[in-house]
Amino acid sequence: MVIHSVTDPLFKAYGRVVEGYCLDGILGALAKTPVPQNTTYVALEPTLQNAQGAQEAGEAFFGGMPFQMGYCNGHNTKLNCLEYHRDSEFNLGTEDFILLLARMEDIEDGKLDTGKVAAFKVPAGVLVEVYATTLHYAPCHVHPDKGFQVLVALPLNTNTDYRPAPGPNREDSWLWARNKWLLAHPDSSEAKQGAAAVLTGINIDIAGDL
């Protein structure tokens, strides 16, 4: 699989590189978070939320709306699922990491072919905004010995427990948590837990492309 850079013009359809903010305090706090052999996600991490510069940055990211700063850390090379929110997500890593991305317009008849997924490498210390119309999921590592530590900044309460009764719209069956619509590959553990298995094609694994 071709791994593009977020500086490549192709990334403009999925997100943007964000400049101008002092991120040293956030990066310092992020560097102290654990890196497991699999992946772990924490929606709100107090040491990130209270890091130097975090309040100013978070307010700017979301225009004064309540926000949360958490992380997704670990080791990963597989797609497994794609998710989207009703707003942008901001990511920042202590090491280089890779995002596997698709666009909402790639969903056809309630399914998405994984052949539509593109890979983008984000350099360490570079902040990116992933647009609300971009499907994404857990980052992938670049360096197997280091793994990844990635900031996940979102509106407050995103990805927290919420599972309403099925609604009349097809998207309602994809709602997996608060402000989190999830499209799973049949091979994923999420599908086995009941997530909608609507990704077709191979479950992408970039291990051989690193």
Image (tube, helix red, strand yellow):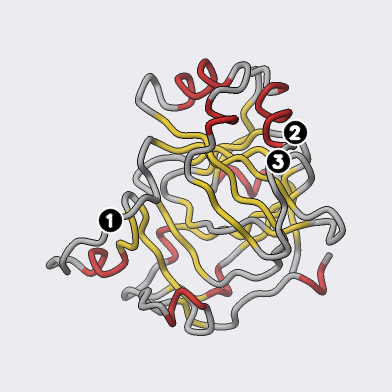
Secondary structure of residue under mark 3: strand
Residue 93: mark? 3
- Compare residues 35 and 198 and report the one nearer the observer: 35
Whole-Å distance between the Cαs marked 1 and 3? Answer: 28 Å
Q: Which residue is mark 2?
A: 125
Dots 3 and 2: beta carbons under 8 Å?
yes
The disc, 1 or 3, on the residue closer to the chain's N-terminal end is 3
Whole-Å distance between the Cαs marked 2 and 1? Answer: 32 Å
Q: Is residue 181 above or below residue 133?
A: below
The disc, 3 or 2, on the residue closer to the chain's N-terminal end is 3
Which numbered disc, 1 or 3, marks the residue closer to the eye? 1
Q: Position of residue 138 (x, y in %)?
A: 59, 58
Q: Is residue 203 above or below residue 66?
A: below
The amino acid type, in three-letter code, at marker 2 is: Gly
- Compare residues 85 and 200 and report the one nearer the observer: 85
Q: Quadrant of residue 109?
A: bottom left
Whole-Å distance between the Cαs marked 3 and 2? Answer: 6 Å
Q: Position of residue 73 (x, y in %)?
A: 66, 52
Q: Quadrant of residue 33?
A: top right
Q: Left or right of 170: which side holds 67?
A: right
Q: Residue at x 71, y 67 (%)?
A: 77
The amino acid type, in three-letter code, at marker 3 is: Gly
Q: Quadrant of the C terminus?
A: bottom right
The disc, 2 or 1, on the residue closer to the chain's N-terminal end is 2
Residue 162: mark? 1
Secondary structure of residue under mark 2: loop
